[in-house]
Amino acid sequence: MNSRVRRRHGPGRERHYDRVVAVRVGVFGGTFDPIHTGHIVAASSARHALGLAEVLVIPAGDPWQKSGAVHACAADRLALAAAAIEGIDGLRLCSLEVERAGPTYTADTLEALAEPERELVLILGADAVRGLGSWSRADEIKHRAVIAVVHREGDSEALPPGPGWRCERVEIPRLDISSTDVRTRLARGEPVDGLMPPAAIHVVRERRLYTAPR
Ligand code: NAP
């Protein structure tokens, strides 16, 4: 990204030079089954705390480690995420993983998003960080991205698996919301206002999602 560097040349005069600097882009992937307010707070807080130009919100197409345990199809989870982040500054939907066939591997996503002068910052909760060692091509992820651990008050320390990871930490407010809890409430016909953005609730109702207990 080009950023303008201003230099003063005499009183009241400025000259501008173009300089190329790395732009930091957040990568926030999830099963998002469904996306909820906790996810939004994590993405938005990471963007602010780490000075990210934007955060790409990326629903997983086929989250292979949750095989058989995903409730809504990829197209529905994508529509929910689109509605949830609509109008939130700096969050942008990315449909790359839904469009890609086969199991979703974060290493493929980081490879596809790599650009010169772009630093990718992979935003992960503590549990996801603990699982990193079991991910496909974890060594490649290590070299392609900085890890941003979103730390909720009361979380125990989460460290990446082994040396060589570039790691940053972001403190976020603890919102005890989980996709499991949201699904359970919806199946019971209970309200989820405040747990999900209103536009995402609208998509849930319109598509009749999460109506059955599973
Ligand atoms: P998820 O359940 O939808 O969660 C998405 C992220 O949101 C996680 O980092 C999670 O942190 C965080 N989160 C959940 N509830 C939160 C709350 N109340 N407040 C703040 N943050 C909250 O998605 P997931 O199934 O864990 O998958 C996460 C990513 O890992 C996806 O992009 C998936 O594709 C990727 N993954 C990749 C591989 C691979 O081989 N490449 C394997 C497994 C997963 P916690 O983890 O702390 O809940």
Image: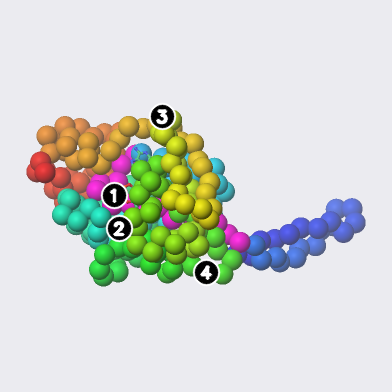
Q: Picture coordinates of residue 56 (x, y %)?
A: 42, 56
Q: Earlier in the sequence, mark 3 or mark 2?
A: 2
Which residue in the rendered view is the most extreme toward the top? 154
Residue matched to label 3? 154
Residue matched to label 2? 60
Q: Picture coordinates of residue 66 (x, y %)?
A: 23, 53
The answer to whether the residue labelled 1 contacts the one labelled 2, judged by CB atoms less than 8 Å apart, is: yes
Image quadrant holding the N terminus, namely bottom right
Residue matched to label 1? 32
Residue matched to label 4? 115
Q: Earlier in the sequence, mark 1 or mark 4?
A: 1
Does residue 31 show up magenta in the picture?
yes
Q: Observer-nearest residue: 2 or 10?
A: 2
Image quadrant holding the C terminus, namely top left
Question: SS for tag 3?
Answer: loop
> Mark 1 is on which residue type?
Phe
**In this rendering, would 153 be left or right of 200?**
right
Which residue in the rendered view is the most extreme toward the left? 212
How far apart, in angstroms, are the residues tagged by discs 4 and 2?
Answer: 21 Å
Question: SS for tag 4?
Answer: loop
Give the magenta range. 22-37
Which residue in the rendered view is the most extreme toward the right? 10
